[in-house]
Amino acid sequence: MYNSLKENISYLKQLTSSSADFTIRELTLSNNVKCAVFTTEGMSDKQELAISVINPLLSQHYGQEGDELFDYIFNNVLTCGEIAEIKDFDEALKLCMSGFAIFALDGCDKMLSIGVQGFAYRGITEPESELVQRGSREGFTEAVRVNMSLIRRRMKNPALVFETMRVGSESNTEVSLCYLNNKATPSSVSEVKNRLKACDLKVLLGSGYLVPYLEDSGKNEIFTGIGITERPDTLCGKLIEGRIGIIVDGTPSALVLPHLFVENFQSVDDYSNRPYFAAIIRILKYISYFVSILFPALYIAFVTFHPEYFPSVLLKNIQKSIDHTPLPPLLEVLMIDFVYEIMREAGLRLPKVLGHAVSIVGALVIGDCAVSAGIIGAPTLMAVAVAAICSYVIPDLYPQITVLRLSFIVMGGILGVWGIVMLSAVVLIFMCSKSTLGVVFVSPVSPFSKKNMRDVFVRLGWKKLSKYNMNVQNLKGGSAYEE
């Protein structure tokens, strides 16, 4: 930085190309020394700026100059609680564009950053993708500082640590790393930091951009060991288990790692309801997962290669349906599944007012007219519809279910049941070989540990669970619970 205020202002204007939202307020102090306050319009609280910065500067009488005056203003004049000294133009602009006010004094080659952030953000509402019957109605919002406060309010623990860094060479997006330093292992925290620092993204506009960089393999695979949640209470529960959370500014969700496969079948309501009811719901979810993937494929395999397994009455109805449709069973199932995905995507992207129209048109076109016209068969439509309904029971796995269902349909139509068995073996091998931060993706099912199965298919009561300190990092050694 320059000693001349005029040169500092000129250089900052040059760096920002005199952007319309980059504002400069030049002031003259009581001893005729000039200073300036730089802000970004819409990112700072104007009232806080006036009370904590402008009014104190103009209401004081000064007898110092240069660095002595700068130190006096730093220590005795400015009333804001968050003030720091900076000596770099790039850092000054990053802070200014984050809502800080930058104070520059003529005759000094350094500046002050003053915390007067006050940008507008969406209010805290219930997350739409993780609805609960009994529990908190608060969800993450787009402001990273607000999300940090939601976590801190639930965990008033000095072991809870937030570390901020910036990712994206062009966007300079703020990313907050959160963990419990007495739960998460230092090696895991260090590894996550290194992966974030090695991220070569130019622009970071969402948390999903970081997932490939945080994976152990770094490849775009079907399953991911990085979880995502929109609920602060869910993230707090993961932090207690030794997980590491990542909050990205501008994204109303948090990343959690490592993430296990069995956690896709767990919800907040499981821990609010009685254990026996939670067990029934979880088993129902597991059944729905396998039905959504395998049911259409098994239907095609049996119809094409093993019709003798059907009861005689059902076989006659299926054969009659196939005789009255122009397409073979494999192409028929693929066509229905393709049309269903189109309807789902249309209903998801359209405005809510028009979303109901898609459902009505889909029900009329596919559910009634197509069957009546003999284009598709009723048994085939039922097989795809049951699989589609079951896939909604596990929304976190919907992308994986869609890809696997299509793959199993093709293998079942070409190779029959043996094709389904071979593909199942490949998927199972892939899942068992996947790990994140050294934790196997399918833990604690494989490697199996009876002690670690306390909260997988069934959930024990809180009186028993509270006796054990769950730490997912211990799964590296085979046991997740500490007596």
Image (spheres, rainbow, N blue to C red):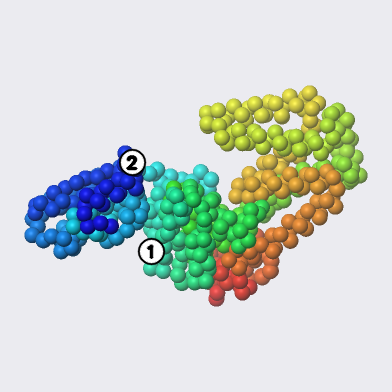
* Residue 37 placement, left or right of 407: left
Residue 19 numbered tag: 2
Q: CA distance from mark 2 to mark 1?
A: 42 Å
Indicate the secondary structure of the residue bearing disc 1. loop
Is residue 236 shown above or below 364?
A: below
Q: Residue at x 18, y 60 (%)?
A: 70
Say above or below: 75 vs 309. below
Q: Foreground: 41 or 233?
A: 41
In which image quadrant can residue 354 be found? top right
Using the image as rendered, state which of residue 222 and residue 262 is in the foreground.
222
Left or right: residue 448 versus residue 421 is left
> x, y percentage for residue 138?
44, 49
Residue found 66% across the figure and 70% down from its top: 450
- Dot 2: element: loop
Q: Amino acid at mark 1?
A: Lys
Q: Residues within 10 Å of mark 2 (few under 14, many from 20)?
A: few
Q: Nearer the viewer, residue 339 or 452?
A: 339
- Number of marks: 2
Q: Which residue is mark 1?
A: 156
State whether residue 483 appears in this view: yes
148 versus 306 height, above or below:
below
Where, quadrant-wise, is the N terminus in this rendering? bottom left
Mark 1: few/some/many CA within 10 Å (<14, 14-19, 20+)? few
